[in-house]
Amino acid sequence: MLAFIGRRILVAIPTIVLISIFVFSLQQLLPGDPILAMAGEERDPETIAFLREKYGFNDPLPVQYVKWVTGVVQGDLGISLRSNQPVSELLLQKLPVTIQLAIMAMIFAIAIGVPMGIVSAVKKGTVLDYAANLIALSGLSIPNFWLGIMLILLVSVKWGLLPASGYVPPGEDLWLSIKTMLMPAFVLGTALAATLMRHTRSAMLGVLKSDYVRTARAKGLKERRVILKHAFRNALVPIVTLMALLFGELIAGAVLTEQIFTIPGFGKLVVDAVFNRDYAVVQGIVLCTAVGFIIMNLVADAAYFALNPRLRKQ
């Protein structure tokens, strides 16, 4: 298994290098000049020259890239042009928030999508199958921002059951932290549940036609045991790998949901950084999310290797 993971890591290294080049080039694509914004309305030429020299904007692009990559390898992602804080500190402050949201959303996705996929496959062609597919299609079709706004209006404003927005760290008040995260996690989880349901259904349909499932039924085993122990267990390989990839997407793609519910995670940080032309923060966030997605791909490969006996034999 170590050799398998090692080969995957070797493949990931050039990918990370290409991502770093792309991330660094973002500062050339973003509109405006952050130095002019920092210089204020007067825009004193001496102040502008000082700031350009301080932040290395006078250096050629290759030199700037080498300096930036050298710092990244050492854990230094630069300094925020707005708050004058190290970017690594900002990311460490926001990362736990996004990870908490992603974990809760994945719990919703698994709790909804996997059982629906199993029932839909077992009851293929019945009312339950059509209902599960209709719910999955609705989950894929409804935009996250619309569902979030509707939940705020109904659950928070009209019924007063959950906080409409904001964030409370689990260390301060665990129950209140969970309550503030329930709605945004549900919004993100419903779309993932729809994807997970369709893949679970497809995997289960393929397994239910296999010989060992027919043999288990011929032995007189209970249908529940046949479905859960024999069929679902063998259908887990594509499902688990999909979960790892979806978790990576959650960390990288919760921007809109975090904006709607005013959650101070990666999404809100990157939006604020783009509007403020804070290049260092944007580069740090995009690089971290890209590397995180690559790591989740490695986790998916490892899970596939662990769950697939044929691959282990090879």
Image (tube, grey):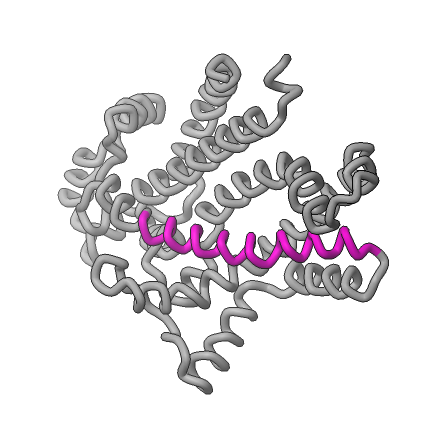
Is 69 magenta? The answer is: no
Q: Main secondary structure of the magenta part?
A: helix
* Residue located at (48% from left, 56% from top): 105
Q: Residue furthest bottom?
A: 158
The part of the chain drawn in magenta is 96-124
Residue 275: quadrant of the picture: bottom left
Badge count: 0
Residue, far right: 125
- In-image side of 67 versus 99 (left or right): left
Residue 118 in percent (x, y) is at 69, 52
Residue 110, horizontal then vertical, whole percent? 56, 52
Residue under the point 30% across and 40% down: 280
> Residue farthest to the front?
220
Name the image quarter holding residue 271.
bottom left
Q: Do we see residue 78 in this rendering? A: yes
Quarter of the image for the C terminus: give it: top right
Q: Residue at x 54, y 45 (%)?
A: 246
Residue drawn at (74%, 59%), measured in percent from left and top? 133
Quarter of the rendering containing residue 217? top right
Q: Is residue 105 magenta?
A: yes
Q: Nearer the viewer, residue 62 or 140?
A: 140
